[in-house]
């Protein structure tokens, strides 16, 4: 069994996780053999964006790895909370990240049970109804295993023991769920197991030494219950300083060129990037009546600028001051 | 044998009850586990220089935050407490100029409860800087306190049972200095005030019917899902006018908090100093009552929660024995229904001299309407295990 290595902090102020393409899989659960079947989707892959991890955040991630507690991440929208988990999956597992990485996006009607598994009651009803004329259907209906589909939490628990490696689970925007939702997750987070109600005494459980690395994001829209908070570690993504924004912009540049399908590109100078970041910080501080632009919006703006420079031959220094572009990209009111 | 040292235990003790929810002992052990398992000394690949992971105050501060700062809204206060605890001299001069008798050495040796008093006091002072008052005065629509009092006397000259509010806004009625958050209070209270019972919903319970069909081959009757039906009854008794005029915004925020609780039936009564007590009965003047979705209208009983919002003569500066007797009578009357009776006194207790409220405090537990105190009374009334 292999647990996750810690993030290497030796002599670095931040960790750059480069963009890579990861394979895609169709993952199904075979209840009879108690294992996940990975069916690689040939020719299909998806890119995981480059990510810059500050030293403080890397320490928090390491703390979550060694303690086995979920890391609750809060921060402004667009600050990179959601992307972190996938970036780390790609950092640890490279192109096979999707074998070990699972996402659970919380909605207002989400229930804790739905994260573990879904039971197809109606399908079973249908099979039971036609069972007199169809022996196969009759057989199926008699076995509840055939109607269970594991969801993110169930897959994360199962994949860990099956592959002998720690999995990474993202529970995204937990504050969107019902007020009782976090409390309903306490057992799952504490003991890393849940019960299948339709099968007596059947539990899906993660091995103790391979507890998944869980990231929970929240936009802080509402308070989370004390019992839940006590089980987590915390990290708040702060407003980045200019230096760090510069590094983020630099890392993302190459990705933009790739997105734009360009092989030859005009590289922006350090001064140009510094000018761009200065402008963004100034706009963020301005009181426009709208929400201050996030880092994600800053990167959209940069992407538009790069596109204009390459395809229209516009001068970067002039474009940065284009109020119309700023308004569109940064979603400013005025 | 060397004395065993628990790293950062003193700071954990100091900080654990400062924020809401309080920290649990598990959270201390998470930090210890991390310290033991994460390599604390890093070597730079380029220069070979060795660096401690927690080198420097800010590194240690950020590290403890991972385990103990559960809400970003407390971040500034957390930083302050951290500095307060670890600074020996400098910060004491800056932060607590009037409390020099609390030397850092004394602070380190005191137990957590004693220590918590001094910074709290300072925080209260900090929330009311003089410039807030000045700025607020300048705002349009605000008028002076004296003027407001005169207007009320005039308006209420012929009608002293109607505790209607003047049209003017009190100069301090500003949400910027609101000591508690409506959202937090409503969410914490919600789970504690509610009484739940199971009722049949109008949705068919498909899984249950499928199981019945599979087992029996037919369905005898339709099965419906059950819903948790919650209801709660909360009574808000608010002292108005006079010295309570300055706290009208707190009453508004209490009301708004209660409004946000689903299935909650709220009764809102107002009085001046104390509710009228005639022929052995209390006359409660209704300021309004409102029902939230699906709420019932129960009688006052052992599950009813009462909040009394009053300074209990705290602003008068004198001891009024009649008022003390009458206040204790009201308290006992409410306690005869339920244990969930809470007296909220908006005056910071540090400001109370020997007066009615100060003496009443010995008989009636009073709380300040700030986030931490409100959480404490809710939690203590119905502890979460």
Image (tube, rainbow, N blue to C red):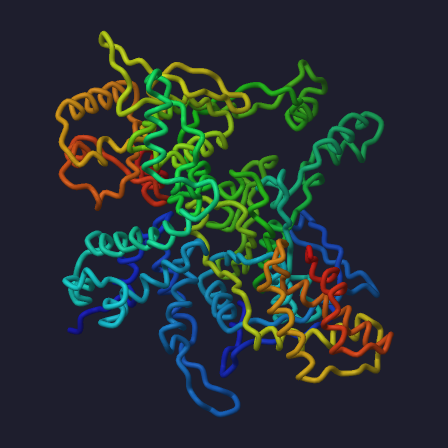
Q: Nearer the viewer, residue B95 or B228?
A: B95
Examine the rendering and report whether any part of residue A8 can be seen.
Answer: yes
Q: How many marks?
A: 0
Q: Is residue B128 above or below residue B362?
A: below
Residue A171: percent from left, percent from top: 59, 52
User: At 67% from the left edge and 47% from the top edge, which residue is drawn?
Assistant: A32
Q: Nearer the viewer, residue B70 or B246?
A: B246
Q: Nearer the viewer, residue B31 or A29?
A: B31
Using residue A55 as the reference point, say whether residue B242 is left or right of it. Answer: left
- Check the image and name the residue furthest to the top: B279
User: At 32% from the left edge and 55% from the top edge, which residue is drawn?
Assistant: B126
Using residue A42 as the reference point, say whether residue A244 is left or right of it. Answer: left
Quadrant of the drawing holding the C terminus of chain A = bottom right
Picture quarter containing residue A37? bottom right
Q: Is residue B58 above or below residue B81?
A: below
Picture quarter containing residue A280? bottom right
Residue A200: percent from left, percent from top: 56, 36
- Check the image and name the residue furthest to the right: A312
- Check the image and name the residue furthest to the bottom: B47
Picture quarter containing residue B368? top left
Examine the rendering and report whether any part of residue A164 can be seen.
Answer: no
Quadrant of the drawing holding the N terminus of chain A = bottom right
Residue B348: percent from left, percent from top: 26, 43
Residue B354: percent from left, percent from top: 13, 38
User: At 27% from the left edge and 52% from the top edge, which residue is drawn?
Assistant: B120
């Amino acid at each position: 069994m292999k647990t996750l290595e810690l993030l290497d902090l030796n002599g670095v102020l931040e960790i750059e996780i480069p963009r890579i393409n990861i394979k895609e899989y169709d993952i199904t659960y075979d209840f009879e053999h108690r294992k996940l079947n990975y069916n690689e989707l040939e020719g299909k892959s998806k890119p995981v964006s480059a990510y810059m991890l500050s030293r403080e955040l890397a320490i928090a991630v390491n703390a979550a790895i060694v303690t086995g507690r979920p890391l609750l991440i809060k921060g402004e929208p667009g600050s990179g909370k959601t992307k972190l988990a996938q970036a780390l999956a790609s950092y640890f597992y490279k192109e096979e990240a999707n074998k070990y990485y699972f996402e659970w996006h919380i909605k207002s009607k989400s229930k804790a049970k739905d994260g573990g598994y879904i039971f197809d009651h109606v399908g079973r009803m249908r099979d039971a109804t036609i069972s007199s004329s169809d022996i196969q259907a009759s057989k199926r209906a008699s076995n509840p295993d055939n109607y269970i589909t594991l969801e993110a939490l169930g897959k994360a628990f199962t994949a860990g023991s099956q592959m002998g490696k720690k999995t990474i689970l993202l529970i995204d925007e937990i504050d969107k769920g019902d007020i009782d939702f976090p409390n309903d997750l306490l057992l799952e987070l504490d003991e890393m197991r849940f019960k299948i109600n339709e099968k007596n005494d059947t539990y899906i459980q993660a091995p103790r030494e391979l507890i998944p690395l869980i990231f929970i994001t929240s936009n802080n829209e509402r308070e989370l219950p004390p019992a839940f908070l006590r089980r987590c570690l915390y990290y708040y993504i702060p407003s980045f300083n200019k230096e760090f924004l510069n590094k983020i912009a630099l890392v993302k540049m190459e990705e933009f060129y790739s997105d734009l399908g360009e092989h030859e590109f005009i590289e922006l100078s350090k001064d140009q990037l510094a000018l761009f970041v200065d402008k963004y910080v100034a706009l963020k501080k301005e009181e426009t009546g709208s929400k201050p632009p996030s880092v994600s919006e800053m990167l959209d703006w940069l992407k538009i600028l790069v596109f204009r420079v390459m395809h229209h031959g516009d001068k970067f220094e002039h474009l940065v001051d284009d109020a119309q572009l700023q308004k569109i990209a940064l979603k400013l009111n005025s | 044998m060397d004395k065993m040292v628990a790293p950062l235990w003193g700071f954990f003790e100091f900080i654990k009850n400062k924020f809401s929810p309080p920290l649990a002992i598990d959270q201390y052990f998470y930090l210890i586990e991390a310290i033991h398992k994460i390599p604390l000394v890093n070597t730079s690949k380029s220069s070979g220089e060795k660096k401690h992971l927690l080198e420097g105050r800010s590194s240690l501060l950020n590290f403890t935050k991972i385990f103990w700062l559960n809400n970003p809204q407390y971040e500034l206060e957390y930083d302050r407490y951290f500095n307060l605890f670890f600074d020996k001299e400098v910060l004491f001069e800056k932060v607590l100029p009037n409390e020099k008798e609390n030397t850092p050495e004394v602070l380190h040796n005191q137990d957590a409860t004693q220590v918590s008093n001094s910074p709290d006091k300072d925080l209260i002072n900090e929330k009311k800087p003089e410039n807030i008052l000045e700025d607020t005065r300048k705002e349009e629509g605000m008028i002076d306190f004296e003027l407001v009092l005169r207007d009320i006397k005039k308006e209420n000259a012929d009608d002293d049972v109607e505790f209607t509010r003047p049209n003017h806004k009190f100069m301090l009625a500003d949400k910027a200095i609101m000591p508690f958050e409506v959202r937090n209070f409503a969410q914490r209270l919600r789970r504690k005030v509610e009484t739940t019972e199971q009722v049949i919903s109008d949705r068919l319970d498909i899984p249950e019917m499928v199981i019945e069909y599979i087992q029996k081959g037919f369905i005898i009757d339709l099965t419906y899902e059950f819903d948790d039906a919650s209801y709660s009854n909360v009574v808000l008794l608010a002292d108005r006018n006079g010295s309570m005029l300055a706290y009208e915004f707190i009453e508004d925020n209490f009301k708004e908090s209660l409004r946000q609780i689903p299935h909650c039936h709220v009764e809102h009564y107002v009085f001046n100093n104390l509710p009228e007590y005639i022929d052995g009965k209390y006359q409660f003047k209704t300021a309004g009552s409102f029902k939230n979705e699906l709420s019932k209208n129960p009688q006052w009983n052992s599950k009813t929660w009462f909040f009394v919002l009053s300074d209990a003569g705290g602003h008068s500066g004198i001891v009024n024995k009649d008022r003390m007797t009458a206040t204790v009578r009201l308290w006992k009357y409410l306690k005869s229904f339920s244990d969930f009776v809470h007296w909220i006194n908006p005056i910071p207790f540090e400001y109370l001299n020997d007066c009615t409220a100060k003496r009443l405090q010995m008989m009636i537990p009073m709380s300040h309407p700030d986030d931490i105190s409100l959480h404490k009374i809710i939690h203590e009334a119905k502890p979460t295990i």
